[in-house]
Image (cartoon, helix red, strand yellow):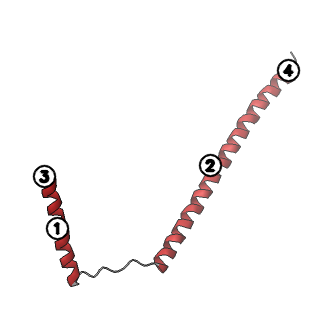
Amino acid sequence: MHPNYENKGRFMETNLVVEGFKFMGLGMATVFVFLIIMIIAMNVMSILIHKFFPEPQANESSAGSAGDKKNIIAAITAAVKYHRQG
C-alpha cells in the first residue's frame, strides 16, 4: 500500500471533523443572533404597547369598589355553600 493513501485518509478525517466544528459554530451563532434579535423585538413591542395602551389606574377610594367586593364575597360564599351541599 502506498504511504500517501494512509496520510490522505487521516487528512480527510481531520478535515471532516474541522468542517463539523465549523458548522456547529455557525449553527450556534445563528441561534444566538436570532435569540438576541427576538429579545430586542419583544422589548420594543413591550415599550410600544405600554406607551400606546397604558394600564388603567385602579382607584381604591371609589364607593363602587367596596360594593363590588361585597358582591364577590357573597358569590364565593354561596358557591362554597352550594358545593358543600352537593
Q: Please, is residue 15 above or below residue 51 in the view?
A: above
The image shows residue 77 at horizontal and vertical percentages of 14, 62
Between the C-alphas of marks 2 and 4, the distance is 38 Å
Is 16 in front, or is 40?
A: 40
The reply to whether the C-beta atoms of the residues labelled 2 and 1 are less than 8 Å apart is no
At 19% from the left edge and 73% from the top edge, which residue is drawn?
Answer: 69
Quickly name the residue at label 3.
Answer: 84
| Rendered image quadrant of residue 11 | top right
Name the N-terminal-most of marks 2 and 1: 2
Name the N-terminal-most of marks 1 and 4: 4
Q: Is residue 71 left or right of residue 45?
A: left
Quickly name the residue at label 2.
Answer: 28
Between the C-alphas of marks 2 and 3, the distance is 57 Å
Mark 3 residue type: Arg
Name the N-terminal-most of marks 1 and 3: 1
Q: Judging from the image, what secondary structure is the residue with disc 4 in?
A: helix
Q: Please, is residue 59 above or below residue 16 in the view?
A: below
Q: Judging from the image, what secondary structure is the residue with disc 3 in?
A: helix
Residue 30: which numbered mark, if any?
none
Residue 3: which numbered mark, if any?
4
Residue 73: which numbered mark, if any?
1
The reply to whether the C-beta atoms of the residues labelled 2 and 3 are less than 8 Å apart is no
Q: Is residue 23 left or right of residue 40?
A: right
Name the N-terminal-most of marks 3 and 4: 4
At 86% from the left edge and 15% from the top edge, which residue is drawn?
Answer: 1
The reply to whether the C-beta atoms of the residues labelled 1 and 4 are less than 8 Å apart is no
Is 31 in front, or is 63?
A: 63
Binning the other alpha carbons within 10 Å of mark 1 as few (below 14), some (14 to 19) or many (20 upward) gives: few
Between the C-alphas of marks 2 and 1, the distance is 54 Å
